[in-house]
Amino acid sequence: MHFLTVALVPPEVGQEAGAVERYIEKQMLAHFHPDSDGWAGPTSKFDYYGVGGNFDGLLHGLTGQPSEEPTSFWQRLVRRRELRLRRNSCSPEDLRKHLALWVNAPTKEAAPEEGVLPAAVLTPDGTWHGEILVEEGVDELIRWLTEVVAILQDHGDCTAVGLDCHI
């Protein structure tokens, strides 16, 4: 099963794609616990992940800014890491505002049509918040939405990067 995880990357990491990916890898590996065969053990949060993946462009779309796609094959090849990162990141404030639309919607019909609700959030201190929400009740969903909004508010200086995790 694939699920969206948002990794919050602090500003001191910078914006260079390689540095951001190395930072995320270090943070994510702390939550991967292989068994004796090297596969994800029972305490692992995921068995593999990638930036974007099935959720490619979802977070970037929250900013309302068009994605800048290079036109030639060679430009895409040279800049693919930077573009993938840009297409899958936004400010915590943009994501928080989007989630607040859900939390504050008076009815289900008034909520945003396209929802971006991460199943987990990885904060700069290495804490993994959340679990996969499968068949959760409405009360639990609202509790999780509220928790995610608070986490994003506390980390407003970070960059939110969308990860496609699998378990």
Image (cartoon, rainbow, N blue to C red):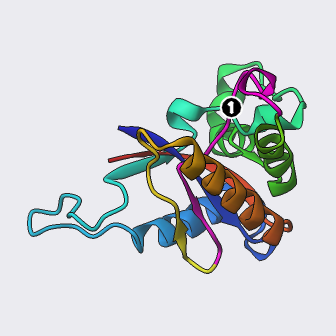
Eyeballing the image, is 107 above or below 144?
above
> Which residue is label 1 attached to?
115
The image position of residue 83, as x and y in percent, is: 71, 38
Name the foreground residue: 64 vs 128. Answer: 128
At 63% across and 70% down in the image, what residue appears? 123
Say above or below: 90 vs 2: below
Residue 79, located in which quarter of the rendered image? top right
Asked which secondary structure carries label 1, the reply is loop
Furthest-right residue in this view: 65
Judging depth in this view, the residue of 163 and 77 nearest the camera is 163
> Magenta residues, as a range?
106-124
Q: Residue at x 55, y 76 (%)?
A: 126
Q: Residues within 10 Å of mark 1 (few under 14, many from 20)?
A: few
For the N terminus, give its image quadrant. Answer: top left
Assess whether residue 109 is covered by the magenta stretch.
yes
Res. 77 image quadrant:
top right
* Horizontal and vertical percent position of residue 41: 20, 64
> Which residue is nearer to you in this view: 102 or 86?
102
